[in-house]
Amino acid sequence: MKKISTDKAPAAIGPYSQAIAAGGFLFASGQIPINPATGSVEAEGIAAQAEQSMINVGEILKAAGATYDNVVKTTCFLADIADFAAFNEVYAKYFTRNPARSCVAVKDLPKGVLCEVEVIACLEQ
């Protein structure tokens, strides 16, 4: 197993890694819309927060030598399922190969954000 870390994505805010590469796959922790430069949530609204979350995911993928095209599975968490359509508009710009996905509404997310995205990517093509 290899720990993947980059300062271009938010640092872990608990006892976990940004991502772990193992067995030819990357398992990335959920990314919320924290601006890694400031360590705070600056984006407002689901579209802006989804955009920052996707950028954070992309930086972790890049640190592992992967892209959004390597992603085989995503899990998406929404604070409000009413944001599903707006979230999908942003999501579709990044995940053009339509990986497998679960998307659920949850009671709360860290720092009161509106969305969180985690991915599993294949590192061997």
Image (spheres, helix red, strand yellow):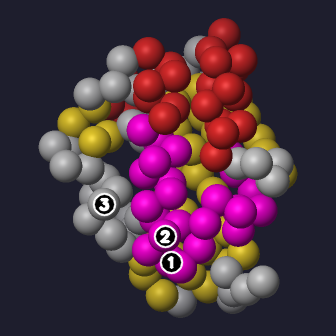
- Mark 1 surroundings within 10 Å by alpha-carbon count, few (fewer than 14), some (14 through 19), many (20 or more): many
Q: CA distance from mark 1 to mark 2?
A: 5 Å
Please, is residue 18 above or below residue 103 in the view? below
Please, is residue 21 above or below residue 85 in the view? below
The region drawn magenta spans 52-75
Please, is residue 54 above or below residue 111 in the view? below
- Please, what secondary structure does the residue beneath circle 3 have? loop
Q: Residue furthest left?
A: 38
Measured as percent of width and height from the top left, residue 91 is found at 65, 37
Under mark 3, the amino acid is Lys
- In depth, the one of 92 and 45 nearer the eye is 92
Measured as percent of width and height from the top left, residue 86 is found at 64, 18
Q: Give the left or right position of residue 125, taking residue 64 as reference.
A: right
Q: Give the left or right position of residue 39, taking residue 6 as reference.
A: left
Measured as percent of width and height from the top left, residue 22 is found at 61, 85
At a point 34% along the width and 57% down the height, the residue shown is 9
At a point 47% along the width and 41% down the height, the residue shown is 53
Chief secondary structure of the magenta portion: helix
Mark 1 touches mark 2? (CB < 8 Å): yes
**What residue is disc 1 on?**
64
**What residue is disc 3 on?**
8
Q: Is residue 56 magenta?
A: yes
**What residue is disc 2 on?**
62
Q: CA distance from mark 1 to mark 3?
A: 12 Å
- Please, what secondary structure does the residue beneath circle 2 have? helix
- In depth, the one of 55 and 40 nearer the eye is 55
Under mark 2, the amino acid is Lys
Quadrant where the C terminus is found in the figure: bottom right
Under mark 1, the amino acid is Ala
Q: Is residue 37 visible?
A: yes
Q: Is residue 84 magenta?
A: no
Mark 2 touches mark 3? (CB < 8 Å): yes
